[in-house]
Amino acid sequence: MSQASSEDPHHIDVKEFHPRARAAIADPKIRQNFRKAMDGLISKRKDAFEGMDLEALRDLGANIRLRALANLPDLLEQLEKKLTENGIKVHWAIDGDEACRIVRDICVARNAKTVIKGKSMVSEEMELNHYLEEHDIKALESDLGEYIVQLAGETPSHIIMPAIHKNTGEISELMHEKTGTDLSNDVEYLTASARQQLREKFMNADVGVSGVNFAVAETGTLCLVENEGNGRMTTTVPPCHIAVTGIEKVVGNLEDVAPLLALLTRSATGQHITTYFNMISSPRKPEELDGPEEVHLVLVDNGRSSIYQDDELLDTLRCIRCGACMNHCPVYTRVGGHTYGTTYPGPIGKILMPHLIGLDEGRHLPTASSLCGACGEVCPVKIPIPDLLVRLRRESVDGDKLNPAKVRGHGAKRGTLEALVWKGWSWMHARPGAYRFGTAVAARLRKLQPGQLGGWTEYRTAPRLAAKTLHERMKERGQ
Amino acid sequence: MADPIKVYPPKPSHVYFYATCLIDMFYPDAGMAGIQLLEREGIKVCFPEDQTCCGQPAYTSGYHDEARAVAKAQLGLFPEDWPIVVPSGSCGGMMRKHYPRLFKDTDHEVKAAEVAARTWELTDFLLNVCHIKLKDLGEPTTIAMHTSCSARREMGVAEVGPKLIGQLQNVNLVEQVRAEECCGFGGTFAVRHPEISGAMVSEKVDTLTDTGAEAFVTTDCGCLMNISGYAEKNGKPLAGQHIVSFLWERTDNGSGS
């Protein structure tokens, strides 16, 4: 991959979370765009599950994913075997770089110069567009949100709605500037303009690249969920289709797909079903009139197999990428997706990215949560996100001698002073006599209590110690 | 690890009262109100003198060795099989949900699970174990309620506060927009990410104020400290109280008022 540069949106320093958060919070446009969009998504999701036994469905979804993960090595082998039988070529990539090289090699072998892309977060993780561009292959995003983000030279700010940080006016200005579209607040018009421009690209593209929502092992079927028809076009019009996905996306059986799909679309956009649902099982057969001549699947590891080694962290891999956790996250809603500086923002990003980039690089991510639990409550596959955040906080300070840390870059956040403060705190609170003495003395000296308490008093008054502790009052009461 | 299943016990003769460190140092009146409400229900309240803190601040900050040392000192405070009642969803959640995780595969695993299983959030205990009946003696008022995220999601008591307040005939309970959204406290989060926490609490204060309520009550002193502290610093006329202080003040508390 290319050299890091502060100008390049693909190479943001993840560690600079705080300044980005401050800037986002001070930006009323960002605040309004996200609040409005997230409020809408929360309400749509709620309506979509109306009258359904949501808890039973979430239990089923969680169990399907847990079962698939429990058999992951076998299912992957079965998937490869079935896909190969179906005429789909399977490739394995240990990381994003290798996955990029595989895609490039396929393009080079076909002498392909233009790639049209359906939405794929794994391709974002690989930084595929960037890589192809450096190798003289032009990749064009065809998902409307991704198209807008690409025009702006940005990265997605949400995993389902990549351009959610922009309002219609901003999109209109961008399209006007980059493509000559008339300025307009008419969403229909803007969409039609983009469609017209994209249609031609579909016809001329040498290769289509897409993601995968579920890969079914028993039948060798790649399922792709989308709304715009661009996924259908990407996977059928160009003569070659390359699907890229993480190794965790495999499920055992076709019947596993229906409950996951019901959960995915309702959780993501509040839809009962998306406009398009593609099930890809082979290249064009001799008797068929359309479809690609060649289909490839690139299975990307990129840190996933190390997550898989740990019984607790494994739950991270249940994710079906619906984005409900970010839609319901009070932190994401305030700071927006770009603040995280990571491919996957919001709660899922906070528990997934440290494995992809290391806890040294991602040390602030697990701390950026009030542990309110809204994410875990809405997760369609019941990932215990708050518990995983606590686990990663523990890993980032090497905070548990009984359970030594194992995530790459662990201990990076452990500071001598902070560790000493917690040791002192622990010493006092593990000794009731010392605690009672200390708190009683503090109560006597409460007039000397500092009025400024760092970040707390930037926004609030300092809490006031009571004249007598409850311990003292209960003692006076004779208890 | 599965959380303990909630099965309400019959009303006991005795309970342990685990006050929490915030109540001990900053809001002892709320602690007294909780104890007196339980006593008025005919329950003998034991206040273990050696209680300090549940260990949550270190636990959520990742310092689990330190959290375990503090939590271990609490495990021995409850020798009888009486319920342990906690006037906080957050500390209650720590004991009920996280103690079993913290002591997993240690010598204290069984004890921690046992303590977890008999830990109750105070308002839940008053309503669903004591079957408390409240007689409102206060002046007509309009209030809003903020249920803490841990009371709502870890202890599952979101319905409880409104039901208790609903028993008070002179109290009009109004609901703020996005009632289920976090106030931004989050323990050390408020200090580590002051700007995000500040943005969250400012919106919480706005939505509470917009209801027209004279005051708000809450299940947790962390939220109370956060919301009231912001309102005070920014000159917003929004008084706050722990819900049990409110319930005790408005009902027959022996003061004759």
Image (cartoon, coloured by chain):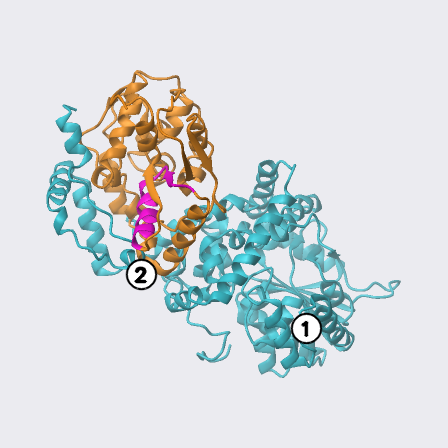
Q: Which residue is mark 1?
A: A184
Q: Which of the two labelled residues, at mark 1 and mark 2, occupies the earlier sequence position?
A: 1
Numbered mark located on residue B85 in the image: none
Chain letter, cyan in picture: A
Residue under pointer 2? A413
Q: In terms of depth relative to the viewer, which is nearer, A195 or A189?
A: A189
Residue B55, percent across and down? 27, 42
Rendered residue at 48%/40% (across/down): B175
Which amino acid, by three-letter code, is at mark 1? Answer: Ser
Residue A388: x percent and y percent? 43, 49
Q: Which residues are magenta?
A: B213-233
Name the residue located 45 percent from the left edge and 64 percent from the top edge.
A340
The hue of chain B in the figure is orange
As drawn, A249 above or below A175? above
Say if the magenta span includes residue B229. yes
Q: Residue furthest right?
A: A287
Q: Answer above or below: position of A231 versus A220.
A: below
3D distance between C-alphas at marks 1 and 2? 48 Å
| Front residue of this view, candidates A420 and A310 | A420
Please tell me if label 1 and label 2 are on a single chain.
yes
User: Label 2's element?
Assistant: loop
Q: Residue furthest front?
A: B139
